[in-house]
Image (cartoon, rainbow, N blue to C red):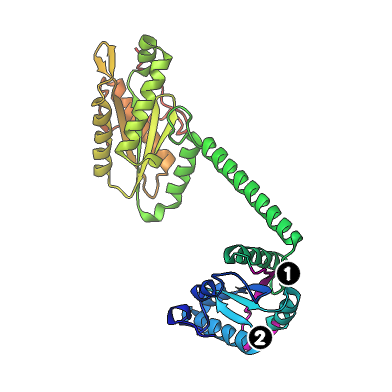
Amino acid sequence: MDWKSHEIDALTGLPNRAGVQQLTWEGFEGWRALAFLDLDGIKEVNDRDGIGRGDSVLRGCAELLRSSLPADAVIARFGSDEFVVLHPLGPAFLADLLRPLIERMRRHQGTSITFSAGVVAVRPDDDLRDVVAAADRASYQAKAEGAARVVIYTEDTQRFADERQHLFTRLSKMHEMIRRLREEAYTDELTSLGNRRAMSRRMREVDDAVDDGPAAALFLDVDRFGDFNHRHGDAAGDEVLGVVAETLALTVRQHDVFRKGGEEFVTFLPGVSLEDAAAIGERLRAAVEDLAIPHRAPGQPVVTITVGVAMTDEATTVEQALALAADRALWLKAHGRRNSVLAAGPPPPADRSPDEDPPEGDAA
């Protein structure tokens, strides 16, 4: 059979997919069976020994098929590690020809390479895509049954494929549900930021990366939030928290900002200096003030935040740094310096454990 140059695979010298498509353009007249062969283990060879060795294996497989199958068969390289065989006799006959070649291929290559094959009967008016799809389903069944075998396509093969697809769909839905539940478990419902559970996980990650250098912990508290709720209602307060959270997430990366609880937010910034962390705190403070959300409490015209900053070091964990940052924010509030950033200053009070939240103390 004469093949045009663009119908020949350059690596193996076999006809390629375009050649098979041209051959069957008007149907499968004269053919009664098609086999789809998928090599087992070629990826491992490529990963272990390199693409060059993989190409050598593919050429060897092509040579074995060409020298072992009858001259009236058409053998083609259909994909990267996929071959197609067309034969004028029935599928049972073609399957019997292919089965002995599985072990011969292993010996011929001196590797673990075998193939799994699906064989399907063809009729003159069949479409190539439908035939290859059916043979491919049979080859998947062969792999599922342990690989290195030949399966003839039957109604059971189709049932196997349908059940496999059904199982795949169910597993996909299950994985998506698990992903969504996990995401919800670590997400604050009101602000869509990470919640306290996500914050704790992030703190562990930062502590585990202590060898990469210090990290900054920023504690951000909405000023006089209790007073805001009293004046405007809880619904308005929730809306403000959502807007503030969105502003913080846009100013730094969203996955670095967490809602600790109530009107308190935190962010962790690995690999930054104290000076840079203070500058980021100031940027966050200014971004919230620039929202110009009316507060209307005496001395509090708009909604603002107070920010405390602290750093980890060899002797200070993220939890301890966060406690110090919270104490600095509390110190600012206690001294009438809301809407400010403090990155250095008084030590944490001795009568409060690192796990305790700082008292609000400024609702009025």
Q: In this view, does 316 lie above or below 292?
A: below
Q: Quadrant of the N terminus?
A: bottom right
The part of the image, by quadrant, that contains residue 335 is top left
Disc ID at residue 323: none
The image position of residue 76, as x and y in percent, is: 56, 78
SS at badge 1: strand
Q: Mark 2 and mark 1 in contact? Answer it, CB < 8 Å.
A: no
Query: Which residue: 27% across, 47% down?
Result: 273
The part of the image, by quadrant, that contains residue 232 is top left
User: What amino acid is at disc 2?
Assistant: Leu
What stretch of residues is rendered in magenta? 103-124
- Which residue carries the number 2 mark? 69
Horizontal relation, residue 350 to residue 273: left or right? right
Horizontal relation, residue 276 to residue 244: left or right? left
Question: For residue 75: magenta?
Answer: no
- Which residue carries the number 1 mark? 152
The image position of residue 295, as x and y in percent, is: 29, 15
Horizontal relation, residue 1 to residue 289: left or right? right
